[in-house]
Amino acid sequence: MEIRWDVFLMIVGASIVTLIPRVLPLVLLSRIQIPEWGMRWLNFVPVAVMAALIGQELLVQDGKLSLGVEVIAALPAFAASVLTRSLLATVIVGMLAMMALRFFW
Amino acid sequence: MALQENLTAPNYEPHIQEERFLQGVKSCIPTLLGYLSIGFAAGVVEKTAGLSIAEILLMSVLIYAGSAQFIAAGMLAASGSPAAIVLTIFFVNLRHLLLSAALSPYFRLLSPLKNLLVGALLTDETFGVAIHQAAMKHRLSEKWMHGLNLTAYLNWIIANIAGAFLGQWIADPEQLGLDFALPAMFIGLLVLQLISRRKLKADLLVVLCSICLVVALSYLTSSSITIILATIAASTLGMAVSRWK
């Protein structure tokens, strides 16, 4: 139940570097007027970042293109999200699909 | 009549605010299972990396970032130096700059301190839920954000500690599909955004560009830099395409 000194330092350091990117734009950008093109650019950030995260999770392993069971499990998860429009259903279907794939593979 | 107004007026405002907070809590519910499984998996990994329960608790309370905690556990197990771990985590979480910037137009009226509180608990998932809400209602409330953020935060801490305690009995979290909760949640968040935004052509182009860039760039640079570069390039493409219309 102890906290080691070097682990403590690491955790405090990590908490600072995770906090700054989260709050800095909100604190600074909310005070200035963003130009129209900037707003249009920001508008596409959510879609772009989610797609990038999905691409990395599904298609990349050890810095290379890799097509594994994740791609197959993504199909029912994708179908569930389109059909149900529910985040919860998407997660459950995705996890069940993955469990089944690992079981039968 | 005047007396009645005086009696009801003070109750009115807090009631509205409380409802907004609770609506935020409610909006968070669909993501809870995803958080639980990822947080649980993170707890298991942290425990097997040799971290104590107290250290795991401190990590989830202070760092509160799944990717960062997985990295910290992995690098600690490989006896990486604290400085190297902090630097890696910094790069991985730089993407939050973009998410925080994308939310900023909705909180322009808030003071810097209130903006800081809104952003402090920002995650990929709460951002996904918030930007979906913003696309539908064209605005975001501060109380709603706090409800969403605090629910996700508490759920994460509980899941982490549960994973740390129960981890010793789970031989293989992957066998239960626990590791797929994260990508499945990202898929759901993306699809819900695409549906609510009604800019499908431009959006699909951005999605395709972003995914191709991530794959191509992963041969050249680290995974966190890849995410940032792909996001910047794909968003720029989206901006350019939407101007032509």
Image: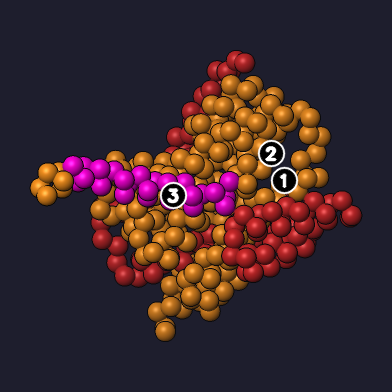
Camera-nearest label, 2 or 3: 3
Sequence-wise first label, 3 or 1: 3
The chain that appears orange in the image is B
Instruction: Looking at this view, name the residue that lies furthest to the top.
Output: A2
Quick check: marks 2 and 1 in contact, CB under 8 Å?
yes
Near-viewer residue (B70 or B27): B27
Q: Is B19 a magenta residue?
A: yes
Residue under numbered circle 2: B41
Task: From the top left corner, tell me how far across and down residue A83 is, in percent.
Answer: 64, 69
State the residue in front, B162 or B99.
B162
Q: Which residues are magenta?
A: B7-32
Location of residue B19 in the rendering, given as x and y in whole percent from the top left corner: 37, 48
Compared with B77, B36 (above or below) is below
Q: Give the colour scheme shown.
A: by chain
Residue ID for mark 3? B24
The reply to whether residue A54 is in sight is no
